[in-house]
Image (cartoon, coloured by chain):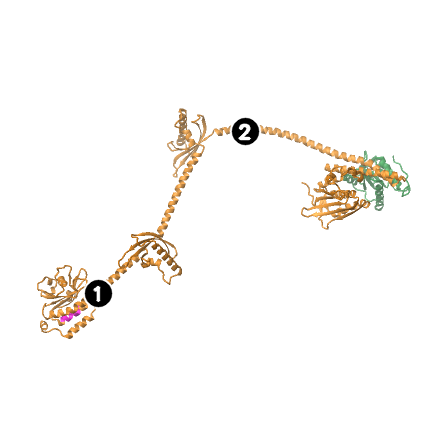
Amino acid sequence: MQRAAQAHGPGPSAKLELLEGLLESNDAADCARVAVAWLGVHGHSERILCAMVAGEPPVLTGLAGHGIDHASVLALQISLEEREQPLARVLRRGTAVVLPAGSEALAALPWLQRKPALAIPLGQSRESELRTGLLIVSPASGMGAQVARWVAELLGPKLSRLTELRSLSDAEARLERERRLLSNIINAVPDPVLLTDTDGRIVTSNTRAEALLAATEIESEGRRRAVALNNMLFSAALFQRAMGETGVARRELLLVDPIDGADLVFELLTAVSRDQREGTGLVSVLRNVTDLRRATEEIEENLRKLRMAEVSVRAERDRLDLIIDSVADPILVTDLAGNIVHMNSPAERLFTASPDGDEAQLRAVRANDTHFSTFVSNLLLTRTDRRWRRHVTLTDPETGSSIPMEAVSGKITSNQGEVTALVTILHDRSEAIEKAKLYEQVKAASEQLEEKVRTATAELVHQNELLQRQRVELEQASALKSQFIANVSHEFRTPLNAILGHTSMLLEGVLGELPASQLRALGKVDTNARHLLSIIDDILDIARIESGRLPLHLGAINIGELVTDVVTQVEPLIKRSRVSVLVKVPPRVPPLHSDRQKVKQIVLNLLTNALKFTPKGSITVKVTYEKRSDKVCIAVADTGIGIARADQEKVFEDFRQADSSLTREYGGAGLGLSICRRLAGMLDGSITLESRLGKGSTFTFTLPRLRRRRS
Amino acid sequence: MGKLKSPAPGKQGKSKEGPLILLVDDFQDNREMYAEYLVHSGFRVAEAGSGHEAIEKAVKSLPDLIVMDLALPGMDGWEATRHLKGDQRTRKIPVVALSGNALSGHLRRAKEVGCDGFLAKPCLPRTLLTEIQRMLVEHAKGGAKKPTGKAKGKGKGD
């Protein structure tokens, strides 16, 4: 091989072959292999090694070898960290160096077997002071070395370029990895994180932030709206932060959960990030504090409740104190040792001496204390019942007078049932005693009164009996009076019967014809006798009414028929007069329920009265029925002499005619209207009069259609 | 006192055969007045001044009609009527009661004891006459028209 090497160098075709091989390789190791293999064939070197500088700190790593076993090539790892390392020096210097036999550098390359070798630095590195690689050939001189130098010329730049490319892609991959890591880290953060530029535009954000602030077209309308709202809220929150501010700012931010629309409360932390190249931006971290906030609110609410409870407990206690103090009765609370632990002001009056109190007052207080202590210890030591009651006599320290008291004690027990204190209420019994005394007095007085009432009642009963007797007597007297009147009337009638009878016989001529003058005189006798009779009849009627001996006979009455009856009855009178009588009864008057005879008597009376005082003209008897009040009116209107206004009420009085001279002219006792009024009264009716002197009169008898029996 | 008066001249003429009317009244003036008028009207008239006398005369002369004043001293008109109506001999004779007391109680009681008619005083002779004539006609038509069964025979008075 040496021979060949000495003879001649490789031909152009071999060189072309190497160039092609290098061009085809895109990898440093491939290039090294191609170059080393070509050298092995054409370079006349016994041993060849191609190594490359890689890593940080730099290490010289074997790539390919010729005349060296493969494992040794791959095992070659020479640290170049030390600047004085001989190979590092070679790589730094950049020129080919012969490594002489026995040199230090050869120690690291055992396969050279200590033979001198030529180390040719390969390529150039832009970033490092070291060359890219190293081509070592042995022997160090001759054709082999020349060919190796030529190959190094080609291989160096190629390796440098490839290394550069690789380191570039390595950096890229690293960058990508870092970016991914960063992104993973950001995404792993459970809080939304965003970076915004100075205009508030989102530069980058993690998935949590995207969920809140980004929406794609395919998402629902509601969600998109929520996102839009969130963006608005977020921008507004950011805007509040002045860009010039430094440090971390915190503020609260309310957003909407785009998924379920719930309100979310965030704490927005923003920090300014300044970068030479990227410019100023804002990093925002949104911390979801909704739950926190809710918890805080709950805690606050509980705290508030607690405070309120505390306040109410305090108020309750104050009120209790107030109540206890305002109780007029002394109240004392004693512990189990018998010491007074609490008392209200009335109790204080009894059991504490005022600072300016005198000796007597002090004594009284001490005596009270002793009494009370005895009472309490009795209860505590001997009694098992919860309550007990005793009479205790205490002394009023102010007046020195003794007060009879009733002491009522109750044991206060804890929840566990053990007695913790005693409450004693003292009640002043003097009032009760006083009351009892008063009660006795009242009772005595009441008994006296009762006795008096009994006496008075007996007296009253007696008086009543007397009255009863008098009433009976009066009734008897009244009956006697009526009887008397009836008798008198009978006694009157008997002679009148003779007078009227004889007169009529004379007038009839039964006892012989009489001269006209005697007949006239007899006529006057007759008239006056009849007048007398009518007076007697009226008196009898009034007596009957007054004595209540005129009973009511209620029944159904057809008022039309009744009026016709009456008119028929006075037909002779009508015929004798120069008056026409008209009857007006509406076709449908419901039947009356009243006393027929009395109604008839009234109508008859009114009609005869009208006839009596109506020399000529007409009389109208008109019946009307007033549905609303259920009353019937019977009006008798005449065109007679009339009654002056002043006399209109008088005509209803007993023995009255408007003009007493009329009595003689018209006859009648003047009792008719007064009877009518009485009768109308019995029927719950009334009689009214309307009249004008000389024009006529209208008497109206009004009565209820239904006369109800008086209860 | 009972005496037959000869009828005075009148429309009916003097008829000894006219119906006999017994007038019972304690007041003589009235009795005589009615008697005079009835006689004048053609009746025969007997008079009685008391209840006892009325019963006695009625039994003896059996009049065609009795006019009975109710208010009589001693035995009153109701009592006398009850007797008459309780006696077989006189029970068919119509009785017209006369009363000065025109109370319904009087009328009711009169009907109870058997009176056939009732007139209130004052009663003009003409009114009495009209009533007597009406009752006689009625009596003649109906015969023993209605001797009121309610009349209680108390035995004859003396």
Q: Is residue A350 left or right of residue A544?
A: left
Q: Which residue is mark 1?
A: A166
Tell me, yes or no, whether dots 2 and 1 are on the same chain.
yes
Callout 1: SS: helix
> In whole angstroms, how far apart are the C-alphas of marks 2 and 1?
129 Å
Q: Is residue A357 above or below residue A529?
A: above
In the rendered image, the residue lying farthest to the top is: A359
Q: Residue A430, image x and y in percent? A: 47, 28
Quadrant including the N terminus of chain A: bottom left
A238 or A380, nearer to the observer: A238
Judging from the image, mark 2 belongs to the subunit labelled A
Q: Residue A75 or A519: which is nearer the viewer?
A: A519
User: Can you identify the residue that label 2 sits on?
Assistant: A442
Identity, as a three-letter code, of the amino acid under mark 2: Val
Q: Is A246 covered by the magenta stretch?
A: no
The colour chain B appears in is green
Give amino acid for label 1.
Arg
- Chain orange in the figure, letter: A
Q: Please give the range of residues in magenta.
A: A32-40
- Determine whether the residue tagged by mark 2 lies in a helix, strand or loop: helix
The percent position of residue A107, horizontal first and vertical second, equals 11, 62
Q: Is residue A333 visible?
A: no
